[in-house]
Image (cartoon, rainbow, N blue to C red):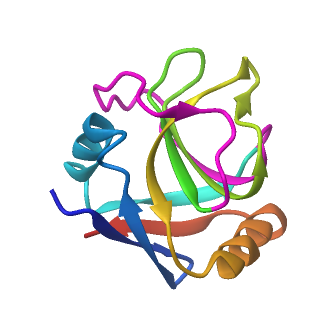
């Protein structure tokens, strides 16, 4: 299992790492879905973050390394329960939540480059809408 990945959002490529030591099942399950292509939109309830709503998609993982308060660049997978399955990417201050209340997601990856650009893209999703995103090895 490779520890590094690339994330492209709106044409900008970010370097990232899998947090395989703390969330091995989540990392392995997500890697099986790669390349993972979708769109990211601004979060509704959580503060300075972007999310990928995934509905009923099941990654067949439980909670590991779960947090409600990711740091900028941290990426969480919420494996469904009180809310739908989703991926959250923090670009600033986040208190992960949904209309059902606070959530905790598995911290499975971290963006390691260009956090200032991540913030810029995050803010633009608020004002301009959805952006394409691709996770690849």
Residue 96 at x, y percent in the picture: 70, 36
**Location of residue 10 (image quadrant):** bottom right
Q: Residue at x 53, y 79 (%)?
A: 113
Q: Is residue 9 above or below residue 23?
A: below
The residue most toward the left is 1
Nearer to the camera, 113 or 101: 113
Which quadrant: the C terminus?
bottom left
Q: Residue at x 26, y 62 (%)?
A: 3
**Location of residue 5 (image quadrant):** bottom left
Nearer to the camera, 122 or 91: 91
Q: Residue at x 73, y 71 (%)?
A: 119
Left or right position of 93 against 65:
right
Left or right position of 126 against 19:
right
Residue 82 at x, y percent in the picture: 59, 15
Q: Which residues are magenta?
A: 44-72
Q: Is residue 54 above or below residue 91?
A: above
Left or right position of 100 against 26:
right
Nearer to the camera, 38 or 27: 27
Question: Residue 48: within the magenta?
Answer: yes
Secondary structure that dominates the magenta span:
loop
Residue 40 at x, y percent in the picture: 59, 58
Which quadrant: the N terminus?
bottom left
Left or right position of 104 against 99:
left
Residue 20 at x, y percent in the picture: 30, 48
The residue most toward the front is 21
């Amino acid at each position: 299992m490779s520890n590094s990945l690339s994330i492209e959002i709106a044409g900008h490529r970010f370097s990232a790492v899998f947090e395989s030591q703390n969330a091995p099942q989540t990392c392995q399950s997500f890697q099986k879905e790669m390349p993972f292509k979708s769109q990211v939109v601004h979060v509704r309830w959580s503060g300075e973050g972007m999310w990928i709503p995934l509905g009923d998609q099941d990654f067949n993982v439980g909670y590991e390394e779960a947090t409600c308060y990711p740091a900028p660049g941290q990426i969480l997978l919420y494996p469904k329960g009180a809310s739908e399955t989703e991926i959250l990417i923090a670009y600033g201050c986040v208190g992960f939540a949904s209309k059902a209340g606070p959530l905790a997601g598995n911290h499975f990856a971290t963006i390691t480059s260009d956090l200032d650009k991540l913030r810029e893209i995050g803010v633009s999703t608020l004002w301009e809408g959805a952006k394409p995103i691709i996770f690849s090895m």
